[in-house]
Every structure is written in C-alpha cells, then in structure tokens.
Amino acid sequence: MKARVTVTLKNGVLDPQGKAIEGALKSLGVEGIANVRQGKVFDIEVDTPDKAQAEASLKAACEKLLANTVIENYRVEIA
C-alpha cells in the first residue's frame, strides 16, 4: 500500500528557509510570489493490506520521528 506523509510548519512558526526560497525566487525574476512556507513530503510503502493499520503505523511514525509535533503538523494520505 502506498502512502504520502506531508509535514508542514504550524501557523505562527517562523520559516527562515521559506523566506530564503521566496527571496531566491524573486531574485530569479519569478513574480507574484509571496509568503513561501517549506515542508517535507515522504512517499512510503506500507506492507499491510489493512488501511486502518497502515494509517495508525504512519501516524506513529510521524509522532516518533517524521514530524516535530511541537512546531509541525502532518497529514497522512493513503492511496
């Protein structure tokens, strides 16, 4: 079973990397860019046919390693 985990910073958390990306895009002449926020995407294959079990395992992985839940949110999508 394939899954995607998306990790993003919570609202209100400063994102210096996003600001740097925003500045770089503007310096490259890309117009209309504002308020860039960066995140992480994990494409994961889960070895179980049970969707609920896969989701529970992925949420546990996020809580333990993939996301810093103090400053980050995560979303699990199973295909």
Image: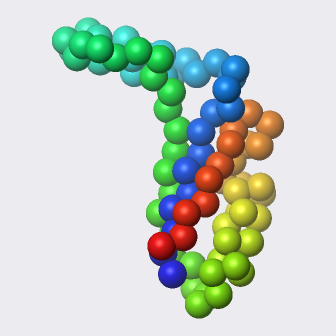
Residue 29 relative to residue 38: left or right: left
Query: Which picture quadrant has residue 58?
Result: bottom right
Above-or-below relation of 58 to 7 = below
Can residue 24 be seen here? The reply is no
The percent coordinates of residue 54 (x first, y second) are 65, 77
- In depth, the one of 52 and 47 nearer the eye is 52
Q: Residue at x 67, y 71 (%)?
A: 55
Query: Which picture quadrant has residue 73?
Result: top right
Report the label total.
Answer: 0
Above-or-below relation of 79 to 11 = below
- In depth, the one of 16 and 32 nearer the eye is 32
Above-or-below relation of 57 to 74 = below
Query: Which picture quadrant has residue 9?
Result: top right
Q: Residue at x 77, y 57 (%)?
A: 64
Can residue 65 be seen here? The reply is yes
Residue furthest out toward the left: 29
Residue 42 relative to residue 51: left or right: left
Residue 43 relative to residue 61: left or right: left
Residue 17 relative to residue 26: left or right: right
Which color scheme does this rendered protein use? rainbow
Q: Residue at x 55, y 18 (%)?
A: 16
The percent coordinates of residue 1 (x first, y second) are 51, 81
The percent coordinates of residue 50 (x first, y second) are 64, 87
Q: Residue at x 80, y 37 (%)?
A: 70
Above-or-below relation of 74 to 16 = below
Residue furthest out toward the bottom: 49
The percent coordinates of residue 33 (x first, y second) are 34, 17
